[in-house]
Image (cartoon, grey):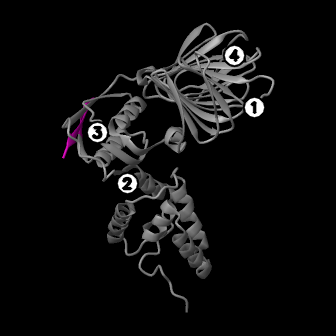
């Protein structure tokens, strides 16, 4: 009779080796679970369902050193349920299971960098939630306020979008005009351009785009941050213009960050090829997994992990020895919160799930930075423990 390795815990999402396998995918665990499922064909359906639930969360394939904490939280949750029931039944609803994994992602897929220096500056970081602003679309001689993270599409001389009541609306635009989309801090938007190119627009961004690409080139203007998937056209090159850089595209996906407040512009190439030019005609050709950064008049190229710069599209921030000041700047922009007194001598590594609930995110940050937090009205305090 074959050994049943789940006599203690038949619920996959409670099993430490299962969690570590889905997080790390190391060869030893791959072999373990391949062998397990060959020996237990009757559990294939439950096994695949557990994988599906766990992998619904966008998890980058890194080596996580805090899986013991993760495992402890899952087991603790399961044991509490066992006290209420005589046994765990795997047919727990997918919604509840996903919620559990979301909770873990928000709170435990982040960690402090143990090699970083302890904070030596401020003892309290104070944040203030700012008044909510609307997304604005300036088009067709009108200024429209869109009070959500809106999706827009340009087609046949019209800009269509869905409002807060889930009603599709349209704005008539002429073929020669330039339109502007203003996405404030705390909001995001998605736009399909007239040629079918797709643009993800991050918080604090202004994007100018034509109703129709009718010239020798297709051009848009960006101040802020976008991720764009460009439709290829040999006859009509695509150019993204920023205050400091122009990016000529040959059919590709890439991220452009050009916030005026950052005093730095950067292009990160996911695939395809682009050429980055400064306003004084210096240029660099890029290959996938490269970043060109423009700072203080200098342009430099380096190889990078593109997920560190593009994960916001998936609702995640990924950090790799990133200064804490950068974390608070990104979170502040994303949630429309102004933070002050942020130390810059500490660095962190990990992943922050961008929940719609700001309390969850601040709680994650408190774990990530080794601090506690309080929220009183629109004031957030992150304090040394």
Disc 3 and disc 1: Cα gap in Å?
A: 43 Å
For marks 4 and 1 on the same chain, the one whose residue lies earlier in the sequence? 4
Q: Which mark is residue 108?
A: 2
Q: Which mark is residue 345?
A: 3
- Is 380 magenta? The answer is yes
Q: Quadrant of residue 119?
A: top left
Closer to the chain start, of discs 4 and 2, is 2
Evaluate whether residue 201 shows in this view: no
Coordinates of residue 133 in the picture (x, y in percent): 42, 21
According to the picture, the residue beneath numbered tag 4 turns out to be 211
Q: Which residue is mark 1?
A: 232
Q: Position of residue 364 (x, y in %)?
A: 34, 46
Q: Of the residues under marks 4 and 3, which one precedes in the sequence? A: 4
Span highlighted in magenta in the image = 374-385
The single residue placed furthest to the right in the displayed view is 235
Looking at the image, do the residues carrying marks 2 and 1 touch, with CB atoms under 8 Å apart?
no
Residue extending furthest bottom? 1
Mark 4 to mark 3 CA distance (whole Å): 46 Å
78 or 19, nearer to the observer: 19
From the viewer's perspective, is 257 left or right of 365?
right
Overall secondary structure of the magenta section = strand
Q: Residue at x 38, y 28 (%)?
A: 336
Which of the two discs, 3 and 1, labels the residue nearer the N terminus?
Answer: 1
Q: Label 4 to label 1, Cα distance in Å?
A: 18 Å
Q: Residues within 10 Å of mark 3 (few under 14, many from 20)?
A: some
**CB under 8 Å between callouts 4 and 1?**
no
């Amino acid at each position: 009779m074959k050994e049943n390795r789940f006599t203690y815990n038949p619920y996959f999402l409670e099993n430490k080796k299962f969690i570590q396998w889905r997080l790390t995918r190391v060869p030893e665990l791959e072999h373990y679970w391949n062998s397990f499922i060959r020996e237990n064909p009757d559990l294939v359906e439950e096994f695949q369902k557990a994988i599906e639930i766990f992998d619904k969360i966008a998890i980058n394939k890194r080596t996580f050193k805090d899986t013991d904490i993760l495992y402890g939280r899952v087991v603790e949750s399961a044991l509490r349920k066992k006290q209420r029931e005589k046994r765990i039944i795997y047919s727990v609803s997918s919604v509840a299971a996903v919620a559990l994994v979301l909770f873990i992602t928000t709170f435990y897929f982040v960690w402090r960098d143990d090699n970083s220096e302890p904070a030596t500056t401020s003892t309290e970081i104070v944040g203030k939630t700012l008044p909510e602003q609307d997304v604005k679309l300036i088009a067709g001689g009108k200024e429209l306020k869109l009070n959500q993270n809106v999706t827009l599409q340009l087609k046949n001389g019209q800009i269509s979008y869905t409002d807060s009541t889930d009603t599709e609306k349209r704005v008539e635009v002429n073929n020669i005009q330039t339109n502007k989309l203003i996405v404030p801090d705390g909001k995001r938007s998605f736009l399909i351009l007239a040629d079918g190119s797709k643009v993800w627009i991050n918080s604090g961004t202004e994007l100018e785009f034509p109703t129709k690409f009718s010239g020798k080139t297709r051009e848009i203007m960006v101040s802020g941050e976008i991720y764009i998937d460009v439709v290829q056209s040999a006859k009509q090159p695509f150019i993204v213009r920023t205050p400091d850089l122009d990016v000529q595209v040959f059919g590709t996906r890439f991220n452009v960050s050009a916030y005026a407040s950052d005093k730095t512009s950067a292009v990160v190439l996911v695939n395809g090829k682009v050429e980055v030019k400064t306003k004084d005609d210096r240029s660099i050709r890029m290959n996938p997994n490269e970043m060109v950064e423009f700072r203080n008049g200098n342009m430099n190229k380096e190889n990078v992990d593109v997920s560190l710069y593009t994960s916001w599209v998936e609702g995640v921030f990924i950090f790799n020895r990133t200064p804490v000041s950068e974390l608070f700047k990104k979170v502040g922009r994303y949630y429309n919160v102004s933070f002050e007194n942020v130390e810059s001598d500490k660095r962190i590594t990990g992943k922050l799930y961008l929940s719609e609930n700001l309390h969850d995110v601040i709680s994650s940050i408190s774990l990530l930075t080794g601090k506690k937090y309080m929220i009183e009205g629109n004031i957030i305090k992150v304090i040394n423990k």
